Image: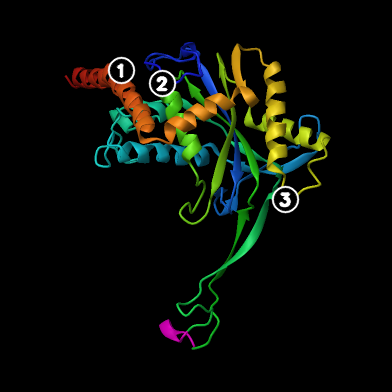
Amino acid sequence: MAILKTIDAKHFHTEIPYKPMGKYVHFLTIRVTESYPLFQTDGELNKARVRAGIEDRNPISRLSMFKRKQSTPERLVGRELLRKYEFMTAEDCEYNVKFAMDNPDCIIYGFAIGDSGSEKSKVVVDTAFSITAFDESHESFTLNAPFENGTMASKGENGSTPGEVTSRINQQDHIKPQVFFPSIVTLKDPTEASFLYVFNNILRTRHYGAQTTRTGRLRNELIGVVFADGEIVSNLRWTQAIYDQLKTDNKLGDLDPLDEDDVISAATTTIEKLMEDEFIVHTDFLGEGFTPLLKEVKALTRSEEGIIQILQQADTEAKAYAKKHISSKKSKSKGKATTEAN
């Protein structure tokens, strides 16, 4: 039985297919930093030198949010819910340690367990880039380690001189609040339940990047979804189009940080224009056309009955897929190994 009333069932498969069937749903997301997150490699913030816009050919450096910095936190939020509502246990399935291979997380987001089996992720996420330049989007902080008395002066413990100021100081670049990362999350061959599972994970995830227990607060503003028979524009091109639009509207230099309403408006306008240039079959839910769907999904996911309904259906589909395809692959692998051994 269909869960959603605002979307035609033709956009979904009735079961998870084994081979690609040419159905895609793209979640159009603006990721907004709300504290000082860290997206870094080897101690430095990730950045890329790219063209400012599609029309503006000047090169700038932009902050980069690599794909795993996006998908892993969202995946972990989904796993948390599966444990909470007892569709999965920590003993049976532990992330990057031991995968159960038959729950929504494993089947939708994929897994790899050496010779034991693997499943390719049906969720595709690419690197996202900040709209504003690197120099405008980060700042450096001096970090220190105060003693228990609340000062930077020691009490003479551990061989130090009483009253001596500690040298435990470090500097770290952080991304500023109100920095915007346009990001398209793609789900291949969605069922209704897998669509809602991924949708809910994006809405619920609040922390990204390093040190997620202390900082890294980020909010996802979904501005639409696109159902299509292929992949659509890249994160970088969408970001460059937004930059051009903000520049045309004189919204870039006047405000620091950028105004969120201006960004959302430019993001919606530009994705509509970019989709007009796509040579694929697509159905867009954008602007006012997206509002009823967003309201329905939020109404479902804010109630315990609704979230259990989604997880139950997703779990049923995942277990049916695993029984039909993963168990058979494991049996064939064992049979092959036995034949070769003989």
Closer to the chain start, of discs 3 and 2, is 2
How far apart marks 1 and 2 lie (CA) works out to: 26 Å
Q: Which mark is residue 136?
A: 3
Q: Is residue 313 visible?
A: yes
Image quarter for residue 303? top left
> Could you tell me the amino acid type at mark 2?
Ile
> Quick check: 252 left or right of 263?
right
How far apart marks 3 and 2 lie (CA) works out to: 44 Å
Which-is-in-front pick, marks 3 and 2? Answer: 2
Image quarter for residue 342? top left
The answer to if 157 sits in the magenta stretch is yes
> Quick check: 182 left or right of 90?
right
Q: Looking at the image, do the residues carrying marks 3 and 1 touch, with CB atoms under 8 Å apart?
A: no
Q: Which mark is residue 155?
A: none
- Give the residue pinned by disc 1: 325
- Secondary structure of residue under mark 1: helix
Give me the residue at 52% from left, 47% from top. Answer: 209
Q: Which residues are magenta?
A: 155-161
- Which sits in the foreground, 97 or 100? 100
Closer to the chain start, of discs 1 and 2, is 2
Please provide percent x and percent y for residue 158: 41, 82
Give me the residue at 77% from left, 39% from top. Answer: 59
Give me the residue at 72% from left, 50% from top. Answer: 136
Please provide percent x and percent y for residue 244: 78, 33
Q: Which mark is residue 3?
A: 2
> Could you tell me the amino acid type at mark 1?
His
